[in-house]
Amino acid sequence: MNRMYGIATDLYQLTMAAGYHAHHRTEKASFELFARRLPPNRSYLVIAGLEQAVEYLRNLRFSEEEIAFLQSLPVFAHVPRDFFAYLRDFRFSGDVWAMPEGTIAFAGEPFLRITAPLIEAQILETYLLATINFQTLIASKAARIVDAAQGKDIIEFGARRAHGMDAALYAARSAFIGGCIGTSNVEAAMRFGIPVYGTAAHSWIMSFEREANAFRAFHKIFPEHTTLLLDTYDTLAAAKLATEIGPSLRGVRLDSGDLCELSKQVRAILDQAGLQKTKIMVSGDLEEFKIAAMLAQGAPIDSFGVGTELSTSRDDPALGGVYKLVELNGQPKMKLSQDKATYPYCKQVWRQYADDGSFLGDTIGIANENPVDGEALLKPAMRNGELIAPLPSLAETQAYARQQLQRLPEIYKALKQPAAYPVRYSAELEGRRQALLKTVAKSKSQIN
């Protein structure tokens, strides 16, 4: 089924659009997407999802079928018919500034800014949030897991536990950006060029009368790619059987029990049989804390297959990114509601670096204010609805994310209670916001 981009949104985006259209609201608006706060035990995010966001913006249309459906809804009964004619010709014509995928970002910083006619900018909210929030969440979780693995390989195994196959697809993509070496998801491998990995399930072993027969049968068909699952019956007995394959055995996988202790015992069995090059993979409800603990205990594990905990970010499964109006027709806009107040104006984020190239701190300021020291992180991605330049390949994005993470000081990567990265607002932005607050307070006093 083809994606219906036009109605891939919440109803209130379209009722607002109809209202704006009826009242001839054509002024230019700027919205910014950011996260007010980070999940527990996180001090940073790895931005992901821009490629899919751009794909959406370039292909956003309303088909006749979608328009007919909207016209059938009672809520649109009194909407002027010319609104639906407007939808027939709808195209995104605005500008996009965004942090490139793989950029390290922090709470309060705009990841993406849209400037477009008000109706266009409003309709985009739901899709952009769903896309950027999810992929950024998973890329960030992957980065934590990869960091905990201390150079050991992480493979994304989460398709069967993801929230549907679309989620599984983009979880695999995001996990790759975050540092995983590959995925078990074949569709993700085909669509995105991600290396694909797989072994065999317990059912393969159980389908044979003897475990040794199952091992030999699998190796016969996949002689250069055999990784044998050992824990169907007796893990150590299976390890001894696996050694009969000989030095061509690529690897073995452990999926249950005391993975740390079993990995040590299996390594000894393999080494004694002369299979020093045979790798040990483990899987089974793994996450960053378990991986770090096993390695701290000297587990001789070469790679980890991580599924549910990664592809759902189970410890905190939703990133609370928001999409807020910051300028309208050139005038600053901000929310004042308790715990949800926002900063006005189109903004830029500048990153300062230490002498060794590591991140020192970030400054959020007004986009067109006097230059602030540091690197501007928001880059132009689209202008007048057109892509400015091709986006990087996924492999290039992964390499960029790796380089970014290497420049992030270790105190911000701690698995528990990491240090808070310094992010400040520029004096000019703070000053203008305070002036606006005084103006609002004065207006309220005059009304009262």
Image (spheres, helix red, strand yellow):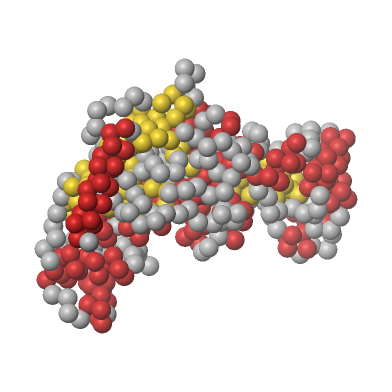
Is 399 situated above or below 438?
above
**Residue 249 in view:** no
Q: Is residue 206 left or right of residue 144?
A: right
Instruction: Give the position of the C terminus as an image quadrant.
Output: bottom left
Residue 414 percent across, percent down from the top left = 61, 37
Q: Is residue 50 above or below residue 123?
A: above
| Percent position of residue 432, x then y | 25, 39
**x and y percentages locating residue 39 in the rendered image:** 53, 49
Do we see residue 435 in this rendering?
yes
- Which residue is found at the position 36% from the left and 43% from the top? 110
Point out residue 136 in the picture as x, y percentages from the top left corner: 46, 48
Where the N terminus falls, by quadrant?
Answer: bottom left
- Look at 65% across and 34% down and name the residue there: 150
Q: Give the residue at x 31% y 54%.
A: 335
The answer to whether residue 21 is left or right of residue 148 is left
Q: Residue at x 84, y 58 (%)?
A: 233
Q: Observer-nearest residue: 324 or 56?
A: 324
Q: Residue furthest top?
A: 355
Quarter of the rendering containing residue 348: top left
Query: Is 283 placed left or right of 35 in the picture?
Result: right
Residue nearest the viewer, comparing 54 with 229: 54
| Quadrant in the picture for residue 304 | top right
Q: Is residue 367 left or right of residue 233?
A: left
* Total numbered labels: 0
